[in-house]
Amino acid sequence: MNISKEEKKAEAIVRMKTLGIFPETIQQFETDDKVSISEPPFGAFYWLEGENLDRIRHFEAEYNTLVYMAIRSYTNIGKMDSFLFVSDYKEEWEMDREDLQHDQTCAYVYNYDAPDCSEIGCIGIMRTSAAGLLRIW
């Protein structure tokens, strides 16, 4: 497929707006390619750096995607980061946008405690009072 990064970025911005993400977080992604992570308990955003950002860039290169944000979760099976991304399959984008309107999305979930169990799947999300996101399932 090879959809351009610019097209994926435009789609990511539409999705971020659909999610009601804080406008400055969207602007930082749009102008400076800053990927933010929503941290519990309030879903406040922080920029990803170092190994965390490297992990995202590796995923993007391997699957030809563009990650536009991440959600950190602490679960009974360990610490996980869910990468929200735009795929290279443009025909799926409309369905992806509809899923977001129903508080669910396809994500790559990195499992810190068992990296070999990391996978792509559907997750449930919830907006927070801090204009961030939490993973709910």
Image: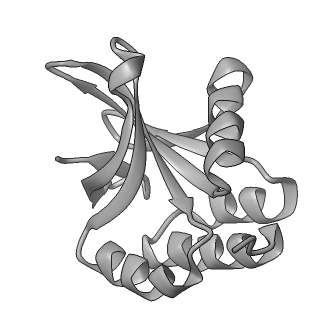
Q: Residue at x 41, y 18 (%)?
A: 115
Give left or right: position of 85 versus 74: right
Decide which of 84, 119 is in the foreground and name it.
Answer: 119
Give left or right: position of 130 versus 4: left
Farthest residue toward the right?
32
Q: Residue at x 34, y 84 (%)?
A: 98
Farthest residue toward the front?
1
Residue 137's spot in the image, x, y percent? 17, 47
Decide which of 70, 5 is in the foreground and name it.
Answer: 5
Residue 41's spot in the image, x, y percent? 30, 34
Q: In the displayed structure, would residue 96 be above or below residue 74?
A: below
Tell me the quarter of the picture where residue 59 sits. top right
Q: Residue at x 37, y 39 (%)?
A: 119
Counting every numbered tag in the picture gives 0
Decide which of 70, 119 is in the foreground and name it.
Answer: 119
Farthest residue toward the top?
113
- Pick the quarter of the image with the N terminus: bottom right
Decide which of 74, 65 is in the foreground and name it.
Answer: 65
**Looking at the image, can residue 28 be seen?**
yes
- The scheme the figure's colours follow is one colour
Q: Residue at x 49, y 81 (%)?
A: 93
Q: In the displayed structure, would residue 128 be above or below residue 21?
A: above
Residue 28's spot in the image, x, y percent? 76, 56
Residue 15's spot in the image, x, y percent? 52, 74
**Looking at the image, can residue 35 be seen?**
no
